[in-house]
Image (spheres, helix red, strand yellow):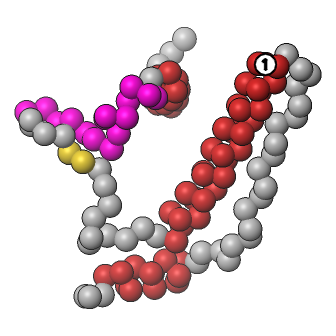
Amino acid sequence: MYHTAAYDAFMTGYIFASYRLMLEDKMSNYRNKVYIMGSDNPLLIQAGPYARTSVTYHQTMRLMNAAAAAAAAAADAAASADATEAPAAEPPTAEAPAAEPSTTDADIQQNTVQNEAPA
């Protein structure tokens, strides 16, 4: 087998996601923190007063939250089916999010200009 950067990136992401699932309850103290060598305090990753999130970000987060809710509901359904040893029911499906207007470059540019305007 030969070395490729794409495979390394994929495996890094896979291992990170696996450990995140296994250690989720123990990792809450480290959420949104980046530990920097030579610094006693971590860098906190959080929203600031000078930057706003884009329309695309909000659309993506809605889709991700809907997918996470569907996965959690499916896991709960599977766990309750295993606990009762009844035939497994099909997991509930997530409803498709409402169609949102597409975001154009002009919308993003206008949002950026509005966000950069002095308050």
Q: Dividing the image into 4 quarters, which one contains the C terminus?
A: bottom left
Q: Which x, y percent locates residue 84?
A: 82, 19
Q: Which is more toward the observer, 60 or 28?
A: 28
Q: Which x, y percent locates residue 102?
A: 65, 74
Q: Which x, y percent locates residue 6?
A: 50, 31
Amino acid at pointer 1 = Asp
Q: Which is more toward the observer, 85 or 90?
A: 85
Residue 67 appears in view: yes
Q: Dividing the image into 4 quarters, which one contains the N terminus?
A: top right
Specify whether 86 is left or right of 47.
right
Specify whether 46 is left or right of 67.
left
Residue that sits furthest to the right in the current view: 87
Instruction: Return the residue at label 1.
Output: 82
Residue that sits furthest to the top in the current view: 1
Q: Residue at x 30, y 87 (%)?
A: 117
Q: Quadrant of residue 74?
A: top right
Label 1: few (<14), some or many (≥20) within 10 Å?
few
Q: Quadrant of residue 59?
A: bottom right
Magenta-span inclusion, residue 35: yes
Task: Give the secondary structure at mark 1.
Answer: helix
Specify whether 85 is left or right of 49.
right
**Which segment is the magenta one?**
24-38
Q: Residue at x 77, y 18 (%)?
A: 83
Magenta-span inclusion, residue 33: yes
Q: Is residue 67 above or below residue 115?
A: above
